[in-house]
Structure formats: structure tokens, C-alpha cells
Image (cartoon, rainbow, N blue to C red):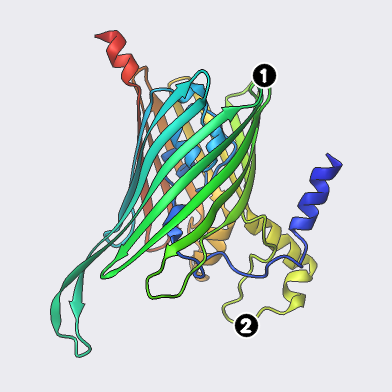
Amino acid sequence: MKCICKILVLLFLPASLLSQTGGDNTYEFLNLSTSSLVTALGGINVSLRTGDPSLAYYNPALLDSSSHGRIALNYVNYFAGINYGYASYSYSHDKYGELSAGLTYLNYGKFMRADPAGNITGSFTAAEYALNLIWSYSIDTVYRVGVNLKPVISHLDSYTSLGLAFDIGASYVSRDGLISAGLTLRNAGLQLTTYTGSREKLPFEIISGLSVKLAHAPFRFSVTARHLEKYDMIHDYINDPITPETYMGLGGVTENIMRHLIIGTEFTPSENFFVAAGFNYQRRKELIMENKTSTVGFSLGFGIKLTAFELTYGRSQYHLAGSANSFSLIVKPSAFIKRN
């Protein structure tokens, strides 16, 4: 325990990278939520091991034998005509562990092409794709490890880029199933071919999380810590650059810690229905309007679980301009086969 505490202290030292979370990486679509449950819980979760194969997208070690034979489908109605989705199939092998293959896509839609004078000369499209090849293996009854290999192709008008990313994860579930935890190194890798000759960084980050289910009440709480590889999560758009006093003062330390955290909770009154809610503090601070705070950063969702399938809806409030709606379907073909 002392060793873990020391590591966490080192990760939050000011000597860490003093950079921000967005705008300086390529393939940022890899950070989009591909599960309605996770969308409802704030956008990221690496600790829940529920048998939902789409959770392995965030931490490959969350893929276990309960995901065997399940098909996961997700669709998100994003902003300005943009939509994206995820599809995967999982298989469990007694000897070699758990396997899953999936595809993530992001469709930006159709754009008008114009010359410098504003004359319309045609149209073009833009889209990005990532293949997900996940392998997970059980070390013992409580610990698992996993790897997700993600070849990436990005096509923006006449510009195309290829990349290779991968995730490495570990998970823990207590023997009574009430406590689960996870640690993931996400989006490591490199850009194989560039858009214009200049190689860009991938959105690498280290994420940890903890989920606790109450023994005698239908609640489960999750806390996820993002970007453990960097300390500074504050960006003062008005007074730039940030001075050391800004992020080293007591208020700055508290603010930085809060910006790393995502909090979520689930209420399950029955085995067939649940309600989930989350709060993403960093998202709220980045996208909030000072004159009207609204519910930016908050998210909500619910799910129905039946024998043959599970249906989940999640809604995340990004900005006053609108919200993102996520729909997920988990199909269990074996249930239909048995019924027939």
C-alpha cells in the first residue's frame, strides 16, 4: 500500500508534464465513449467488470468469460451531423483466455469544397476508423490482465494517415464481487504515416479507477482518475501562460486533483433495470458558460436487461448548444439458439 501511495504522489508532482488534454494529439476519436453505460457514468470507466464486452474498450482486462458469445453495438448521435459507433464480438477460450474483435468508426459527414474566393467547387468527406483486437487473461480468481491492439486509419478529404495504438490494462475484483479496480495505459503507439509529413502524438494517458457496490443497498459508486501521467489540468484562457503560483497554490492543487476525477453512480432496484449518473469535472470547467452554468459536465442514463439482450441509453451534457445521445445494444445469440 505504501508503494502505491508513493507512485501516486510522484504522478501528481509538478515536475510532471505541464500540458493540456486536448488539441495537441492526433486520433482524438479514440477517447470517445463507446458504451452508453460509461457515457452515463461520466465518459470513462476502467474498473467495472459486468460482462459488458464494450467495457473492454476502456480497459482490456475487463473482458472476462461472462462476455462469451456476446455482440456489443453502440451508436452515438453527436454534434453538427457527426456520428460514431462501435461494434464487437467476444469469445472465451478455456486455455487461451478471452478474445474480442471490434471496430470503432467516426463519420464527420459531407463538407462543401470552396476556393479562396468562396466559390463552391465540389464536396468531400472525412472519417476515422480503428480496429480493436482485445485479449484478456486471468492470473487468478481476482486479477486479470489484457491488451488491446488498435490499427487506425484516418481519412480527411485528400489526406490519409495510418497509425498503430495499443492499450495495456489490469483489473481486480474482490472475491465477494463488491469491490473492483482497474489500471490502464491507453493509446500508446505511433503515427505510421502522416497527413502532411509531420508526425503527431497519440492521445496517450494513464487511467485508474475504483468501483464499490454496497452489500445491502442497490447502489454502486465509481471514481475514475484520468491523465495520471500529468499534473497540470488547468488552462487559463484569459491569463495565459499559467504562472507557477496558479497551479501550486492550495486552490490550484485542489482544482487540479478535481479535474483528474470522474464520479459515477448506479442505482439497480432490480436485476432487469438500472439508472446511472455521472459528473465529469474537467468537462464542466472546459465547456461551461460563466453566465449560465446549466448541467454541463453531468450525464444520465438507464438500462434494461433481458435474457436475450440488454438495451442502454446514455445522455451527456457537453455544452449549452446540445448533448450527445448514446444507444447501446448487447445481444446474446446463445439465448435465441436455446429458445429455438
Is 241 placed above or below 39 here? Answer: below
Residue closer to the observer: 321 or 324? 324
Seen at 55% across and 42% down, the residue is 45
Category of crowding for the residue at label 2, using alpha-carbon neighbours closer than 10 angstroms: few (below 14), some (14–19), many (at least 20): few
**Which quadrant: the C terminus?**
top left
Seen at 63% across and 37% down, the residue is 170
Seen at 45% across and 53% down, the residue is 30
**Which quadrant: the N terminus?**
top right
Q: Earlier in the sequence, mark 1 or mark 2?
A: 1
Residue closer to the observer: 62 or 300? 62
Question: Badge 2 is on which residue?
Answer: 239
Which percent across, then down, holds residue 255? 69, 62
Q: What label sits on residue 176 in the rendered view?
A: 1
Quarter occupied by residue 68: top left
**Is 178 placed left or right of 41 in the picture?**
right
Say what amino acid the circle numbered 1 marks: Asp
Secondary structure at badge 1 equals loop
Which percent across, then down, holds residue 287? 49, 65
Marks 1 and 2, how far apart in space? 50 Å
Say what amino acid the circle numbered 2 marks: Asn
**Residue 227 visible in the shown view:** yes
